[in-house]
Image (spheres, rainbow, N blue to C red):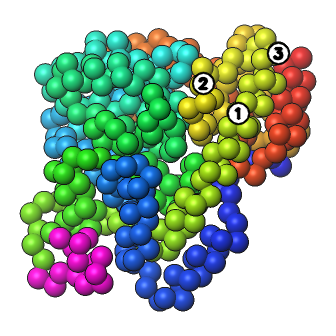
Amino acid sequence: MIRLSKSSLSRAEKDAVLAVLDSEFLGMGPEVCRFEEELSEFFGRPAVCVANGTAALHLALQATDVGAGDEVLVQSLTYVASFQAISASGAKPVACDVQYETLTLDWRDAEQRLTPRTKAVMPVHYAGGVGCLDHIYRFANQHNLRVIEDAAHAFGTTYGGRRIGSFGDVACFSFDGIKNITCGEGGCVVTDCEAVLDIVRDARLLAVKGDSEQRRVGARSWAPTIDRQGWRYHMSDVMAAIGRTQLTRFKEFKAKRRTLLVRYLSNLAGLRSVQPLQYEPASVIPHLLSVRLMPPANRTEVRSRLEQDGIQTGVHYFPAHRLAFYRDEHARPLKCTDIVADQLLSLPLHCDLSVDDVDFICGALERALR
Ligand SMILES: *Cc1c(COP(=O)(O)O)cnc(C)c1O
């Protein structure tokens, strides 16, 4: 079976985990500190490690003072984590449409959904592409909104020559098992906003004031000061050890993902009923290989034919505005999302795939479309 996605782990990750186990300190300690330093160097500004990408988004919202009574503009076509993080903060996620070419937030549609309660916008860097990010920032500045980038797919992607996370308001990354680099479970918040950094550092560890700093030197606060709601959202040294090793392998991952993307794009160019997303292979590190299947292709049939050939596929994503918990009967329709949601198909993409695998997958797709 060719898996849709998977972690790519070497001996080095296993050795790093064993070294932490040998230390018999498994909490947030020296490995997390070093991982934060290395990530901060990677992004060129401070990164705070947390338990997962959803926690990163939730903390970023809390730290930008988004909460009950506020609204956050977010594309419907995303992993439900983006929506859950917003509703966890007490705010209301307002489902927005996407642009057809890139499946990133359509800021013109978002503009139609502004209300006096709109506090922030959460663009999702779908599949690693970022769309018109400077339009989104311009729109946010005009309307005095915070920007929390859901950059879970965009680790390593650049925009205008700069890494995602190295500029802008607040960017949140995920290191879950299938992301561009993994910790098993993990995430980080990247920003140069001191106020946000202070709150995230404390709130990730039950909001014990200064505890993150204490733990850098192996101490902790026995008589805590607590002045806000906090969470158990810190990262453990076991996870950080995996992440640190993956970061050293990132150059290899980056080259591999790009090679696979270029191969896919050239193979798929000949298939009339398959439309890849608009990518800039030179700046994007692809996280997903999503395509749109055009009529008369039948997605269910194509997926089952591929499965018979041992190829796992996926659909990213079921739009959040159709989920019972987030449905809003009075909302304007999301035209592009509703069309594209029924066309989307994700093909296998991970670092243990070869170009021969990509040729095999594309050949099988061609046969399935006949
Ligand atoms: C993976 C992901 C997240 C959440 O990250 P976790 O580490 O799984 O909590 C958020 N948004 C998107 C778009 C994701 O793909």
Estimate the x, y position of residue 51 in percent, counting from the top left.
40, 61
* Residue in the foreground of this view, choosing between 245 and 232: 245
Q: Residues within 10 Å of mark 2 (few under 14, many from 20)?
A: many
Q: Position of residue 67 (x, y in %)?
A: 18, 42
Image quadrant containing the C terminus: top right
Note whether 118 is above or below 56 in the view shown: above
Q: Is residue 354 magenta?
A: no
Nearer to us: label 1 or label 3 = 1
Q: State left or right for residue 125 relative to residue 201.
A: right
Instruction: Report how many numbered discs are placed on residues in the image.
Output: 3
Q: Secondary structure at mark 1?
A: helix
- The quadrant in which residue 107 appears is top left
State the extent of the magenta-drawn residues as a range. 210-223
Of 310 and 288, nearer the camera is 288
Separation of disc 2 and disc 3 at Cα? Answer: 17 Å
Q: Earlier in the sequence, mark 2 or mark 1?
A: 1
Which residue position holds label 1? 261
Distance between mark 1 and mark 3 Cα atoms: 15 Å
Crowding at dot 3, Cα within 10 Å, few <14 / some 14-19 / many 20+, comes out as: few
Element carrying mark 3: loop
* Residue located beneath label 2 in the image: 279
The answer to whether the residues at label 2 and label 1 have Cβ atoms under 8 Å apart is yes
Residue for point 28% across, 20% down: 138
